Image: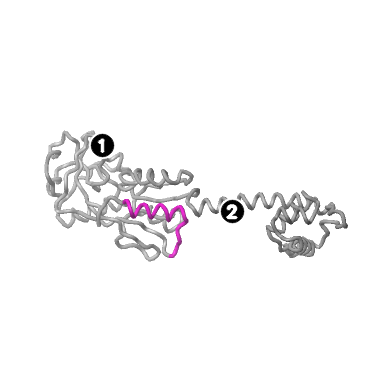
Amino acid sequence: MPPAALPDFSARQLEAVLALVEYGSFVAAAARLRISQPALTRAVKRLETELGVRLFDRTTRRVQVTAAGREFAAVAERMLADLGITVQSVREVAQERRGLVVLSSVMSVAGAFLPRLIAAYRADRPGVEIHVRESVHGSVMEDVRSGVADFGLGYVDELPDFAVGTPLGRETFCVVTSARHKFANRRKLGLSDLADQPIVALPTDSRTRRTIDAAAAMAGVPLRQMVVVTQIATLLGLVAADVGVGIVPRGAVPAGRNLRAVPLEPRLVRRIGVIALREREPTPAAAGFLALLRREWPLQN
């Protein structure tokens, strides 16, 4: 059985009903709504015609609400209240005062640069909730493809057809050692210097690991990647404990923590930036975060 057609009426007509119920007079209700009495009369008549019921009994002295009118007035009050809440919510979302941003980021960016950017964003928009998904580049791409994330932060070279990349800067690799390591005070290191060193590495499915392995193969240097971890924070902790040295993006090495970042020569560089699903428009909250990201990104192109 097809559903009954919904009546076509406006918020102004609902306000007219409530005003008439409250004042019991077309003159008083029209004054309350700041419209003319004939305009109010026409609005109520159109609504009654649309509903197919009489909401008010008119006499020369006053207006009397019918039983149907009382029931409809209760519904109208709830509808206007809900509409007011919805309009306010939509405006808050559009003005970035409320909402949700889900971003997926490679670990070197998530730990190094995002905390400051998120703090700056939330200082102006405390009502916006932010979810950060940290993983390897392949997982970032899957989060973007599936729509789980509003956008990703990863490597923008050689993206698949479903994605579009906006470069933000370049990420340079370094050798990270403990402050006690024999390489800690070196001004630069080459891959050949690391040939006999135990290396703490990321898994083979990470873009960082694949970049390092490709560079080592090109240089003909066999690296001893003796300990494999899935998180850069764990890698840095093991390096600080002198388990081995690591090769990581420079931005991933925090100040202090008993670590030293030594430049890698020849330089190993990747472009990093925003990855988005092609033809997907960002939400207002995500667009605001992206604008801040492009303005405040600390790396130089």
Which contiguous range is marked in magenta? 279-296
**Looking at the picture, which amino acid does disc 2 mark?**
Val
Depth order, front residue of 88/227: 88
**Looking at the picture, which amino acid does disc 1 mark?**
Leu
Checking the image for residue 87, the label placed there is 2
Residue at point 15%, 38% (across, down): 184
Would you say residue 285 sits in the magenta stretch?
yes
Q: Residues within 10 Å of mark 2 (few under 14, many from 20)?
A: few
Residue at point 13%, 49% (across, down): 190
Question: Mostly what secondary structure, the magenta segment?
Answer: helix
Q: Which residue is mark 1?
A: 238
Q: Nearer the viewer, mark 1 or mark 2?
A: 2
Residue 280 spot, x, y in % from top left: 45, 62
Residue at point 60%, 52% (across, down): 86
Mark-to-mark CA distance, 1 and 2: 53 Å
Side of 181 relative to 119 (left or right): left
